[in-house]
Structure formats: structure tokens, C-alpha cells
Image (cartoon, helix red, strand yellow):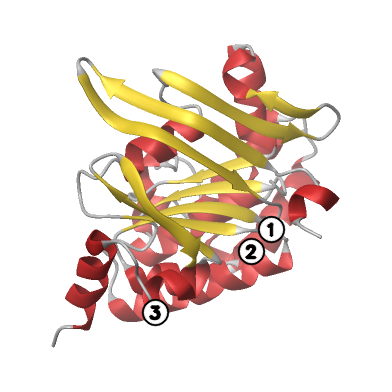
Amino acid sequence: MSKLDTTPPLMRVQGLSCAYGAKTVVRDISFDLWPGEVLAIVGESGSGKTTLLNTVAARHMPSAGHVYFDLRDHGLQEIYAMSEAQRRMLARTDWGFVHQHAAEGLRMNVSAGANVSERLMALGQRHYGQLRAQAIDWLERVEINPNRIDDRPDTFSGGMRQRLQIARNLITQPRLVFMDEPTSGLDVSVQAKLLDMMRTLTRQMNLAAIIVTHDLAVARLLAQRMMVMQNGQAVETGLTDQVLDDPQHPYTQLLVSSVLQP
């Protein structure tokens, strides 16, 4: 029995295209994302993968197509048919967004604790002690010393800032998180630690994720399924190991061989 027979997808993307002016950057993309599934979108710079991520995450209006999300009480709903207020609430509750540059996803002038608990406050929580306790719990879960709760992010290393951004996004127990090159620019040892933490959290929380990356090793470690993009189109999609071990499209073969070259 297929997944379609047993449960609806968490997200359904149909015929999605995106344009900047007269230039079409993403062309006719369709896929389903299932609860707890991690999808990696890979491709070289300029392939359209970040534009696709931003459009699916309601950050850039599509020129054609539809994006549906399984709302807890209403089933699959077209996100671009929602009001702006409804989309903002969705982004604060069931969605998270981890930026490539952590400073874009954090408030750098307030404490780590305030950053982590801000999403809870946006949902109406006001009890200081409870907010602080939950912030401490999440700092520990992303391996940040809770003694740093009152320190500002601008005193943190790059890896710590990225872990803080992840805690800020996951504290509301979302069902889907979008990640744009989450390990880019970090030292190799820091990347490895961050990837291990992300893999653990997605599994523990049954968290679905869409991850944009140019790093095939990141895709193999985190994602069950992979989409390869070239010139705004999805040229190959499949199980991550199958795509990487037996690529079918010439562009995917080129990507994989470039990684394997000494």
C-alpha cells in the first residue's frame, strides 16, 4: 500500500513556477512531502533551488502553480489562498526557517534566551519563568551552555549562532522546517557536529524538512529523498542513495563525478 493510500502528504507542490520580471527562475516543479520526511534540493549556484525554497515557504509569490499544506484541523489548504495573517501564524507555529547566515534568522541585539522564546511569546505565552525554562531546555538540546542564556548572539561563534537559530525555530514544535544551506561557511568539524544534531532532532521530532544545499554529503546524511535542479527545472528526483549511487541524468552524473574526483 502506498503512502497516498494511508495518509495525506504534509505538503503538496503542483506545477510551481517562479519568475523575476521576464526571467523564469523555477519552472513547473511538482512534489509531495510526507510527515517526517527530509527532502534535499541540490544543484549548482543559479539552478533555482533557493528561489524554489522561498516560494514553497511563502516568501516569494509564484507566477504559476500551487502549494498546499496539511493544516491540523482543515487538511490540505492552498497557502497562497490564505490571508497574510494566516501565513504569518503558520510560519510561527507549524513551520520553521533556518537561514544560511544565522544573523538573518536571529535578533542580534537581544539575548539568546529572548531569541529562543520569542516565537512562544508571539503565540501568547507571557509567564517569564516558563519562557526561561523552555529556552534553557532548548539551549541544552542544541548543545549550548545554558549559562549563555543572557548573552547576545553577536558574542557566539558561527556554529553556535546556527544552533541558536535552530532552537529558535524548533521551540514551537513545528512539523516542517525549511533550511537554506544551513552548514555553508562553517568549519568542517563544526559542520559535522551541526549535521549530527540536525539528524537527531529531525528523527526525534518526526520533523519534515526541505533542505537546500550544494553539498551532496549533506544531502546523503540528512535526506531520504533528493531533487536535482538545473536551470530552474527538476532534472532528477528519487531516493537519495539511489540518485547518488546510480545517477540517471547527465547533469546529476556530472555533479556526482565532480565530488568523487581527487
- Which tag, 1 or 2, sits closer to the chain's start? 1
Question: As shown in the figure, which amino acid type bears the numbered disc 2?
Answer: Thr
**Image quarter hosting the C terminus:** bottom left
Element at label 3: helix
Residue at x 38%, y 27% (from the top left corner): 17
Residue 202's disc is 2
Identify residue for label 1: 36
Is 16 in front, or is 138? 16
36 on left or right of 103: right
Residue 143 in sight from this viewpoint: no
Identify residue for label 3: 245
Element at label 2: helix
Residue at the far bottom: name it: 262
- Which tag, 3 or 1, sits closer to the chain's start? 1
Q: Position of residue 175 (x, y in %)?
A: 69, 47
- Which tag, 3 or 2, sits closer to the chain's start? 2
Question: As shown in the figure, which amino acid type bears the numbered disc 3?
Answer: Asp
Q: Position of residue 73 (x, y in %)?
A: 86, 30
Q: Nearer the viewer, mark 3 or mark 1?
A: 3
Is 200 in front, or is 224? 224
* Alpha carbon distance from label 1 to label 2: 7 Å
